[in-house]
Amino acid sequence: MVEAVEMDTARETVTIELGLKEGTIWGCPVCQKRMHVHGWERRRWRHLDTQQFKTWIEAEVPTVRCDEHGAQQVRVPWAEPYARFTMLFEEVAIALLQGMTTAAVTKRLGISWDEADGIKQRAVRRGQSRQTARVMQHLRVDEKHAGHKLWLTVVSCVDDGKARVVYVAEGRDQETLDAFWHGLTDEQIAGIESVAMDMSEGYTNSVLLHVPGGRQKLVYDRYHVAQQMNKAVDEVRRSEQAAMAKEEAKTMKGSRYWWLYHPKHLPRRVKGRFRRLQDIARKTAKAWEFKELLREFWECPDRETGHEHLREWLRRALRSASAPVAKVARMCKRHIENLLTFFAHRSTNASAEAVNSRIQSLINQACGYRNPQRLITEIFFHYGDLDLAPRFPQ
């Protein structure tokens, strides 16, 4: 109960003194057994501001001694154990931290950077402890370069139409992904229907080792294949342009990204010039044609049609005089089975790439992270879809 309220206009603070009713029965906060009071400790918590005045709650908190758990401080109903802020204050801080930079929140709430970071870390631990083992049907696995020699493996789930990060770890090899499967129950692993990823050998081996029927559930990402094909076209363009006469090479200047466009999306203002470039740069135009034919593979209506289209593309591409195109064709031939699983699941890594983009915005905002664990905490805080808010004890 409130025993006193003190307002200091000079310091712009309000202090609320809370007391206890006589005859209160105490119990161990761990096992709930009735205990005697062993001692008292004066505590202070930051609460939501009263107008522009900082508000503090002060109280004497009892400590009980339990035969099983030792000395334990009784939990107060307005704050979590050992916290310096009330739960209502932390809830507001969490909402602000999700939409603002940490520096902006510290200025807005009048707290230090370390205090704001502590609120964030407690929120993530709280959210992860509340998670239940629910089945995740559609998973996306991707790697993320997060700084000098720092790579992360990011696993996200898209069952609800929105990607949520379910696993992040430092590294990008098989062992890193193996740790994710080890943390799942048998029911969760059996419930997996598709896993989309790039053609990483380590990730592939991990899926095949831990996911039953993994060969039929593994889908190689179409955008990774398109990326490799775009690189091949650009390699052919650079090689051909370097061998051109000076005047012809000038006409190619500034056309690098035109060769990566879908024909329907090519800007109208450059279509005429692009057609002329196709007559000048014959090798590049041929590589561009192979790129567009491969794009049509993903638009096939079913597996049979797609298989026939891909076989014909491979036959032509492998005979191509263009070494970069043939290299992509050999890659596709090695992984043809898990390119065709696309038609069973229609899965791509587009959502995972979107998550990677948002992670990059966090890295840019912070000007990089020296501590990988701090970045992982940030990722879960913003994109883990966790229940972060503190709750009052029953």
Image (cartoon, rainbow, N blue to C red):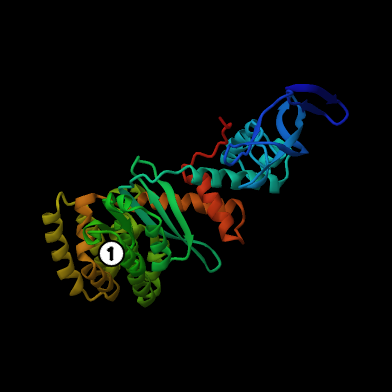
For residue 270, say whether it is visible. no
Quarter of the rendering occupied by the N terminus: top right
Q: Position of residue 394 (x, y in %)?
A: 56, 29
Q: Residues within 10 Å of mark 1 (few under 14, many from 20)?
A: some
Q: Position of residue 7 (x, y in %)?
A: 83, 24
Asked whether 90 or 146 is in front, the reply is: 90
Would residue 255 appear left or right of 336 to someone viewing this image? Answer: right
Would residue 251 appear left or right of 111 to someone viewing this image? Answer: left
Look at label 1 and name its amino acid.
Leu
Reading the image, the residue beneath label 1 is 208
Asked whether 238 or 224 is in front, the reply is: 224
Residue displayed at 53% across by 46% down? 381
Q: Position of residue 272 (x, y in %)?
A: 31, 54
Q: Position of residue 123 (x, y in %)?
A: 57, 43
Which image quadrant is residue 179 in? bottom left
Q: Up-down: is 104 above or below 147?
A: above
Residue displayed at 19% across by 73% down? 318
Asked whether 58 or 68 is in front, the reply is: 68
Which image quadrant is residue 306 in? bottom left
Residue displayed at 33% across by 55% down? 261
Q: Up-down: is 56 above or below 195?
A: above
Q: Residue furthest right?
A: 10
Residue displayed at 49% across by 49% down? 358
Q: How many marks?
A: 1
